[in-house]
């Protein structure tokens, strides 16, 4: 079975609504709720045929989104960790936010603070107060969604430790993975422990039990198998052991790491880039294993539907009726007709009207 799960980006909505995703949007819970509601109303009115909603790319899920939810600290996970490490937050009024890079560069790795120390950080304390105020002042009519969560499902989201290490230390971190394995292993483990500690803390504060964890190890596709097994597998397994069923995301073509993914503790789902072989995933994990895959950006932007339809045909044939979700995040420049053609092709296949054999 193939289904589609789509979301809409800040850049796409900024062009049409003129909303500003400024600092207040991220740190004022009233502003956040009002803008999120306005964005979702617009999406519902104008894109109902695409079955999409407004959320962070690949993180929130429409079936778990509730109109009364209020995102507190709704910021990409490695940006939260980066701010706790001293990075500057950099909102963009018409696009996704970012943080200053290399916030750990030059840090003495022998003086890394224990992960629990970050629970006393002013930002963590502020979000904790925000959550408590929402519960108390709304009479439980509003549902605060704590940092690292994006809906009421209980599935948390973090960035993988290697992806975060690259963000916090810069490009030289890739070389360090090869030339300084002991110190690299130390930083990767430490970053995974920080994510685990923060997720567990905000789960308790937000009264939202953890049901699973999405780990966005975006750079996995750039690692060789040995490096993936040395760093990604143990750091990700730590999260699976502590937080439960694990959804593992790797951008780009990830064919070469598919077999090694079997070594990740708690692995329950794979989410991969659109050029990855679904056939290989099915041969390794079987037909019932949940798989997510994203269409190719060039097909989403193309002036014709032919590319995305050819991509869907390839994916559907390789999937062989397995449990698969096509996920896209509508960005500025994507052609809506291509997404509608993809929806029609998936619907035709599910209703038995497809020409695929």
Image (cartoon, grey):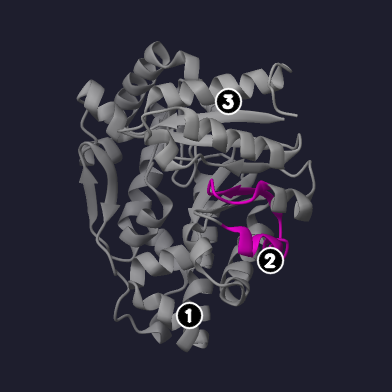
Q: Which residue occupies 41% across, 30% down?
A: 70
Gap in angstroms between the C-alphas marked 3 and 1: 39 Å
Q: Is residue 252 left or right of residue 54?
A: right
Look at the image and give the residue range highlighted in magenta: 254-278
Q: Nearer the viewer, mark 3 or mark 2?
A: 2
Tags 1 and 2 in contact by the CB under 8 Å rule?
A: no
Q: Tell me the quarter of the image containing the C terminus.
A: top right
Q: Which residue is mark 1?
A: 177
Mark sitting earlier along the chain (3/2): 3
Question: Quadrant of the image for the N terminus?
Answer: top right
Q: Which residue is mark 2?
A: 260
Q: Nearer the viewer, residue 319 or 81?
A: 319
Residue 206 - label: none
Furthest-top residue in this view: 45
Camera-side mark, 3 or 1: 1
State the mark number for residue 63: 3
Residue at horizontal 40 percent and vertical 41 percent from the top: 298
Q: Secondary structure at mark 2?
A: helix
Q: Secondary structure at mark 3?
A: helix
Q: Is residue 53 above or below residue 153?
A: above
181 and 1: which one is in front?
1
Residue in the picture at 45% in, 22% down: 68
Image x and y of residue 42, in percent: 34, 16
Q: Is residue 251 above or below residue 207?
A: below
Task: Return the x and y of residue 227 as percentages of the image width and height.
Answer: 56, 76
Q: Is residue 20 above or below residue 34?
A: below
Query: Element at badge 1?
Result: helix
Mark 3 or mark 1, which has the lower sequence index? Answer: 3
């Amino acid at each position: 079975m193939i289904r589609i799960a789509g979301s809409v980006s800040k850049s796409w909505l900024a062009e049409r609504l003129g909303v500003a995703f400024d600092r207040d949007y991220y740190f004022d819970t009233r502003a956040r709720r009002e803008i999120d509601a306005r964005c979702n109303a617009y999406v519902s009115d104008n894109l109902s045929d695409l079955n999409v909603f407004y959320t962070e790319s690949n993180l929130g899920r429409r079936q778990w989104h509730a109109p009364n939810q209020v995102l507190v600290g709704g910021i990409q996970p490695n940006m939260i960790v980066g701010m706790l490490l001293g990075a500057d937050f950099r909102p963009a009024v018409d696009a996704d936010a970012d943080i200053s890079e290399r916030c750990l560069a030059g840090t003495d790795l022998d003086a890394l603070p224990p992960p629990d120390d970050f629970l006393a950080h002013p930002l963590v304390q502020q979000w904790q107060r925000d959550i408590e105020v929402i519960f108390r002042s709304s009479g439980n009519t509003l549902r605060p969604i704590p940092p690292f969560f994006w809906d009421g499902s209980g599935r948390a989201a973090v960035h993988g430790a290697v992806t975060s290490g690259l963000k916090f230390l810069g490009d030289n971190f890739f070389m360090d993975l090869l030339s300084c394995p002991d110190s690299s292993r130390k930083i990767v483990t430490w970053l995974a422990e920080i994510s685990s500690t923060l997720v567990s803390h905000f789960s308790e504060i937000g009264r939202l039990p953890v049901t699973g964890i999405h780990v966005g190890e975006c750079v996995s596709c750039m690692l060789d198998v040995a490096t993936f097994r040395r760093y990604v597998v143990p750091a990700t397994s730590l999260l699976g052991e502590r937080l439960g069923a694990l959804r593992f995301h790797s951008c780009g073509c990830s064919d070469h790491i598919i077999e090694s993914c079997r070594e990740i503790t708690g692995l329950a789902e794979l989410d991969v880039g659109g050029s990855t072989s679904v056939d290989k995933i099915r041969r390794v994990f079987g037909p019932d294993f949940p798989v997510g895959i994203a269409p190719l950006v060039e097909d989403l932007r193309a002036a014709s539907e032919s590319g995305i339809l050819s991509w869907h045909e390839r994916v559907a044939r390789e999937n062989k009726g397995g449990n698969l979700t096509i996920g896209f995040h509508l960005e500025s420049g994507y052609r809506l007709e291509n997404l509608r053609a993809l929806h029609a092709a998936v619907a035709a296949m599910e209703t038995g009207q497809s020409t695929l054999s």
